[in-house]
Amino acid sequence: MSVSMRHARELLQQAELLYPAEQVQEALRNVAREINAALSETQPLVLSVMGGAVVFSGQLLPLLDFPLDFDYVHVSRYGDARQGGQMHWKVAPRETVRGRVVLVLDDILDEGHTLDAVRQRVMELGASKFYSAVFVDKQHGRDKPIHADFVGLEVPDRFVFGYGMDVEGAWRNLPAIYAVREG
Ligand code: IMP
Ligand code: MG
């Protein structure tokens, strides 16, 4: 369930703008350039982690200049709460990853449990190589079980939203990235 429209508008009004849309697009072009340089000969299977990665994936794919296959997984950890919770597979990685170079796209690397779980499933299913790209890497100073190969932007240890990331179910559609103002 998402929050009421009025509450969603208040959340945005009170939020702090971290990266305006132009900076988001510049970071996107940089990530695309790095992926083009690294993966152009691999014909990867690109797996988008629904639903947070939908905006990143949708804008990144047209910037990639090599042939690729596309599929998705759907895992959620947060539900609507702002604290991390149980991992819930709605669509797990499929047999199609066997023998493939896999590039997983996600919106944000926070504690890293989500991406780590995706990597484990993908490698168990016999992928030949695993790469990951996250649009945002949260800097919280704690060890992460996985680091992304490609990162768009860094954010502080705050709850962020926009560019695919939701706050209480809302605002995945924003072209910029905001942080919730605490207190
Ligand atoms: P992790 O398992 O802690 O790395 O969590 C990653 C997932 O949690 C992401 O795919 C997001 O869906 C969600 N998430 C983590 N931090 C935030 C945040 O600050 N805003 C919105 N979603 C977040
Ligand atoms: Mg997610």
Image (cartoon, grey):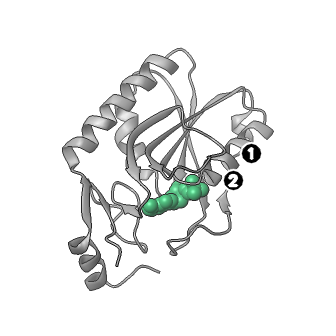
Closer to the camera in the image, 174 or 159? 159
Quarter of image, res 176: bottom left
Label 2 Cα crowd, 10 Å radius (few <14 / some 14-19 / many 20+): some
Q: From the image, tell me which residue sits under label 2.
A: 92
| Among numbered discs 2 and 1, the one appearing first in the sequence | 2
Left or right of 19: which side holds 144? right
In the displayed structure, would residue 167 be above or below residue 92? below
Q: Is residue 33 left or right of residue 138?
A: left
- Left or right: residue 179 compared with residue 106: left
- Secondary structure under badge 2? loop
Q: Is residue 166 left or right of residue 142?
A: left
Amino acid at the residue labelled 2: Ala
Q: Residue furthest front?
A: 141
- Gap in Å between the C-alphas at discs 2 and 1? 8 Å
Q: Is mark 1 within 8 Å of ligand 1?
A: no
Mark nearest the camera among 2 and 1 is 1
> Picture coordinates of residue 99 (x, y %)?
73, 27
What is the number of the mark on residue 35? Answer: none
Indicate the position of residue 3 as horizontal and vertical percent values. 38, 82
Contact? badges 2 and 1 (CB < 8 Å)? yes
List x then y, in percent, for residue 41.
53, 14
SS class, disc 1 = helix
The answer to whether residue 9 is above or below residue 127 is below
Hey, what amino acid is under mark 1? Arg
Tag 1: Cα neighbours inside 10 Å, few (<14), some, or many (≥20)? Answer: some
Number of marks present in the image shown: 2
Where residue 54 appears, as percent x and y from the top left, is 43, 52
Say which residue label 1 marks. Answer: 121
Q: Nearer the viewer, residue 64 or 111?
A: 111
Residue nearest the observer in this picture, 46 or 6: 6
